[in-house]
Image (tube, grey):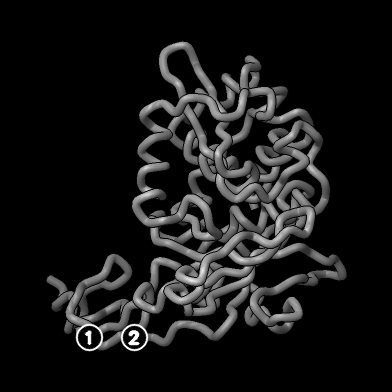
Amino acid sequence: MKHLESFGVILLTLLGGCGPVEEPANTPVEPGGMDIQALEDANGLAFNGLAFNGLAFNGLAFNGLAFNGLSSSSFSSWFQQHPAESNRFMKYLVRCAVPNGQTRTYTNGTSTHVWPGQMGLAPGWSSGLPATLAEQQVVTACLGALVNKYGRSVTVSLLGTNAQGQHIPTTDSELSSHTQREACFFGNLFNGEGVFVGNDQGMLTPSQSSLRACALSGSNECPPLIHIGSCHTSCTHDPTGTYFARCTRNGVNYLPITTRIRPLDIYTCGDGTCQPTESCGNSDRANGCKQDCGTCG
């Protein structure tokens, strides 16, 4: 599992010690960061549990990070090996771990990268402490929840608690629009235990497809995500039944993230639009949808 080993090294070295907290909060956002924040603000995502997903794990298979801070030469060396992938990874890591209203900044001498926080799932790490076991687990779960097979962005509602047991804020409009129960994500990439995903309310039919295929396909299409089948065989709900409060794998209890999506983000062959998840063919299946994508050749 090269991807998993590489990703685990990156996470462990990033969050095992002082971490990015030496960078000041509320740093003025450079143009790259403004693009991200404007996209969120335009969709009303800045102050609730919604987050864009678009992280592709296969872009994270690189090594070489010995992290002592964002201003260290080792971080700079790691970052410059794969600048685009490193920037993308840090965007999602900071989004998961750091509270909304704070940013983390890295300047390499010629350009400045600003990564806004949003979820605040690791408050201890964000304040300068080493990542706790709970923070390792919930950040792992968040990163898993922000992955999709196609690397495209759709909105997903993240439900659960941060590492200190505080509920991820949600709004009534979020819960009313994102009514499709999707998946559970859990694990620990920091210690090599892996990251797992399960279906909440069943898998896609052959005629259906979604950018969220990593969770809904029922197969291991998005390594290092390991599909476990139904969430309900490994996880237990909170008292309200809103989200999964704990998941267990190989005798280990994990703090998970539960996701919901909009029903319109599940596509069906025959709806008149050739979606990115569909292909041409001679059937009514998503991978050969004649009605929407025509015949091949």
Q: Position of residue 150 (x, y in %)?
A: 39, 59
- Please, is residue 256 above or below residue 16 in the view? below
Tell which residue pokes out farthest to the front in this image: 172
Vertical side of 248 occupied by 102: above or below? above
Pick the residue in front: 237 or 276: 237
Residue type, label 2: Ser
Q: Quadrant of residue 60?
A: top right
- Which residue is under mark 2? 207
Give percent across and percent down for residue 36.
40, 42
Q: Is residue 234 visible?
A: no
Question: Label for residue 120?
Answer: none
Q: What residue is rendered at 63% in x and 79% in y?
A: 229
- Give the camera-side residue of 241 and 141: 241
The outermost residue toward the top is 109
Residue 207 point in image, percent of width and height: 34, 85
Are the two marked residues, 2 and 1, in contact with CB atoms closer than 8 angstroms?
A: yes
Count of marks placed on residues: 2
Query: Would you place residue 81 above or below residue 180 in this image?
Result: above
| Percent coordinates x, y for residue 90 in the rendering | 55, 37
Say whether residue 235 is left or right of residue 170: right
- Which residue is tagged 1? 270
Taking the spot 63% from the left edge, 71% from the top edge, the residue there is 184
Residue kind at label 1, given as amino acid type: Gly
Q: Who comes first in sequence, dot 2 or dot 1?
A: 2
Instruction: Give the alpha-carbon distance from disc 2 to disc 1, as whole Å.
Output: 9 Å
Query: Residue sitting at 38 percent across and 77 percent down?
Result: 266
Position of the C terminus by quadrant? bottom left
> Closest to the observer: 136 or 4?
136
- Quarter where residue 197 is shown: bottom right
Could you tell me which secondary element the residue under label 2 belongs to? loop
Mark yes or no: residue 109 visible: yes
